[in-house]
Image (tube, rainbow, N blue to C red):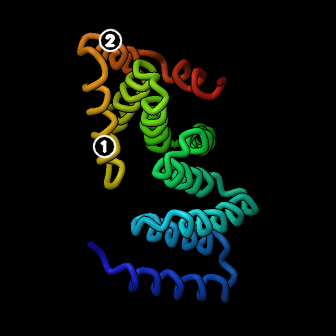
Amino acid sequence: MGNFEAAVAYFHQGLDAAQRVNVPWETASLWNGLGEVARSQGHIEEALAHYAKALEISEELGNRWMIAHVLDNIGHAAYSQGRYDVARDHFRGSLEASVALGDERGIAMCLEKLGGVAITQKQLEFAATLLGAAEALREARNTPVEGMDAADYRHFAEQLQQQLAADVLRTAWDAGRTLPLSIVLARILDQ
């Protein structure tokens, strides 16, 4: 699939350079990138260690965008381990940071992933509402589901189609599409 050894070597070269010239935001980004490479290989504990370093630096810098990104990645790693409560908490943290930034793409991504967590908790109609809200936000901003997130999104949608009657799914999905985003966000963030 990819040359992971070369990617890791490049990331380490970048880390050495960023630390040598004291560019902490780049250092955080590179630790996050190393986490993504490890997660792509299924080395979740290694990925989490790299993400922790990225998050620590990002928090020291107050870099909300990187904080949102790293929290999302930690949530993804926890989800892959079946630690859905941990995943939910990190996706919510990422959502809070994305809302503070006004990052609508980030908000949509978080809604989709929180929908996935809701499916694991058998909150199927709520999951459909979240996916509907994410879809509406993406359509309004012309930000399609990308890359690795596309497979997750398809999986969540397929699970809902299998577990909910078509009319129930459509009603809940459409509710997410039409509800004001502030209502959807309040339902998640006020839990």
Q: Nearer the viewer, residue 50 or 147?
A: 50
Relative image position of residue 92 (x, y in whole percent): 59, 38
In the picture provided, is 11 more to the left or to the right than 151?
Answer: right
Marks counted in the figure total 2
User: Disc 1 vs disc 2: which is toward the camera?
Assistant: 2
Mark 2 crowdedness (10 Å alpha carbons): few <14, some 14-19, many ≥20: some
- Which residue appears at 59% of the width and 39% of the height? 85
Residue 144, numbered label: 1
Depicted 37 relative to depicted 78: above or below = below
Look at the image and tell me in which quarter the C terminus lies. Answer: top right
Q: Residue at x 25, y 10 (%)?
A: 167
Coordinates of residue 19 in the picture (x, y in percent):
66, 83
Name of the residue lying farthest toward the right: 60
Amino acid at dot 1: Pro
Location of the N terminus by quadrant is: bottom left
> Where is residue 57 drawn, in percent x and y?
70, 66
Q: Is residue 126 above or below residue 74?
A: above
- Residue 5 placement, left or right of 1: right
- Mark 1 lies on a secondary structure that is loop
Of the numbered discs in the image, which one, if any, rests on residue 50?
A: none
Tell me where residue 63 appears, x and y as whole percent: 66, 57
Read off the residue under disc 2: 171
Residue at 57% across, 56% down = 70
Q: Earlier in the sequence, mark 1 or mark 2?
A: 1
Callout 2 secondary element: helix
Name the kind of residue labelled 2 in the image.
Thr
Asked if the residue at tag 2 contacts the one at tag 1, i.e. Cβ–Cβ closer than 8 Å, the answer is: no
Q: CA distance from mark 1 to mark 2?
A: 22 Å
Mark 1 neighbour class, 10 Å CA radius: few under 14, some 14 to 19, many 20 or more: few
